[in-house]
Amino acid sequence: MSPAARKLPFTCRKLPATSARGVVVTNHPLGSAAGQEMLALGGNAVDAAVAALLALTVVEPMMVGIVGGGVAHLRLPDGRHTVYDCLSQAPAAARPDQFRPVSDSLPDYMETEGRRNLVGAASVAVPGNLAGWCKMHEAHGALPFADVIAPAIHRAAAGFRATNYLSANIERHAADMSADPEISAIFLPGGQPVKAGERIVQADYAESLRLVAKEGAAALHGGALGRALVDRLARDGAEEGLVSLADLEGYVPREREAVFGSYRGHDIAGPPPPASSGVHVAQMLNILEGYDLAAMGFDSAERLHLLAETIRVGFEDRRAASGDPDFVDIPVEKLISKDYGEACRGRLRGAGGPGAVPPGYESRNTTHITVADGDGMIVTATHTINGLFGARFMVPGTGMIPNNYMYNFDPHPGKALSVAPGKRVPTSMAPMIVLKDGSPRFALGLPGALRIFPSAMQAILNLVDHGMTVQEAVEAPRIWTEGAHVELEPAHAHHAEALRAKGHEVKIVPHIGGGMNAIAFGSGGAMTGAACWRADGTVFALGGGFADEGVAFHI
């Protein structure tokens, strides 16, 4: 047990794993196994990452799919960082007034008549996951793509046992899913949600993945899978499914430069807009650099109040200046500057209190992976189909579950985040890499929508200021606020009254954000992976290796 652990108000529930050859951490054991299989075959971190993500589309179907979107942060062995923006975008036929909002105020601001932006064909945006994964693998993978997709094909065809996590999520949205016979046949057989331990087989999806193995992303972006998707969307009428074959053919994953900040001698690298994390994690760390958090101690109301105020300021600036950089001018250099961080300290209040919070929405239902190989390649990636089970229907004959990404746009015309053709909405996804003296120290990320980047920021504080192990850092209790109220996880509940005395409206919640996973990089090439209790996270670390050249046995 580390010195830090003896003073912490929580006990770790999972175990880390260490290797110098490669580590894969995902939020499902079969996702991690798929990635580890690639490393065992001699593949690199990109092979492992893409294999894991494809396998997760099978075993975490409520969270991620090839008809979804996300962000992957790649660090190459030569030190270059590339961010693959695979976020979904509005189709060319999209219009600012295509939805009819039911309210101009909270809590129903994002809701529309008939829930058309949430469930069904009208909620589907142009996907980017498969195109981005294929592009990243083509540029940097070492194994044939057929090998990389093989674990996902096998798992879809042979089936897998449902976890409690999956079963609970099927039950949660059974009412919407029951309206579609295709998705019901898989997840609601006989009209009842699949229970934990029962086997799920996805034969149609296995065939779709076999087509992807042959044709790559073109199978969806212009090929037979794309035509099947467009035909299914068109079945609901011209006012519903707007994604066209031309939209799919024209989709381009963006390669963007990472945003770099610094904190107490560490470099902090994250994705740029339309992701918010690179900018606002750097901003919040700049604010906090002016305070001695280590002296405050992890388990103190003083520290929690400071974090709440810092997160509030970060969200104020995110709402004022965020969006798709193709549509909005975002002052990145200003927001991540040390001078601006110092100026922001003047906005921190000695006493908190709820304020007016403009509406905003992001789905909490994403997945995250963190992968590293023995040659210095790192992938940290967050991907989604937006809501649980996306648009909550399945494309006939394909097993594909489309995203419901249109729910992230403001349904009111004339707003910064209103629907516009080709627009990508901001995301809180935070695949982060922390470096010291040019060398990686930590890579991490998590699901959880608006709670993602403040949670990632807190993990960095846990590692840098509080000396936690990587396992402690990902499992540690979190705090969150967007301005209206402060959320605490149960292990911080004993500070609720002290925060209320400072004017905060406090809520105790079961968890903040989702299953964080991370890798710490130590001396001698050692890598330690960790996954937290908030999801089915599992670590695989590669040991052993191939025989020395020339070794043979004779009988």
Image: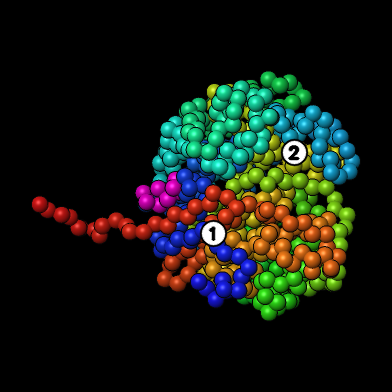
Per the rendering, the mark at residue 407 is 2
Q: For this rendering, which residue is in front, 145 or 552?
A: 552
Left/right of residue 144 with respect to residue 330 in the rendered view: left
Rendered location of residue 518, percent (x, y): 55, 59
Rendered location of residue 17, percent (x, y): 45, 60
Q: For this rendering, which residue is in front, 344 or 517?
A: 517
Identify which residue is drawn at 54% across, 68% down.
469
Q: Residues within 10 Å of mark 2 (few under 14, many from 20)?
A: many
Of the residues under marks 1 and 2, which one precedes in the sequence?
1
Residue tagged 1: 13
Amino acid tagged 1:
Arg
Identify which residue is drawn at 81% across, 37% down.
111
Q: Secondary structure at mark 2?
A: helix
Amino acid tagged 2:
Tyr
Left/right of residue 444 with respect to residue 141 in the rendered view: right
How many numbered discs, if any?
A: 2
Rendered location of residue 410, percent (x, y): 81, 41
Left/right of residue 357 with respect to residue 88 in the rendered view: right
Is residue 142 among the parts visible in the rendering? no
Magenta portion: prevailing SS class: helix
In the displayed structure, 20 sits above or below 447; it is: below
Q: Viewer-nearest of labels 1 and 2?
A: 1
- What residue occupies the far left of the structure in this picture? 555
State the extent of the magenta-drawn residues as a range: 33-41
In the displayed structure, 509 sits above or below 184; it is: below
Is residue 285 among the parts visible in the rendering? yes
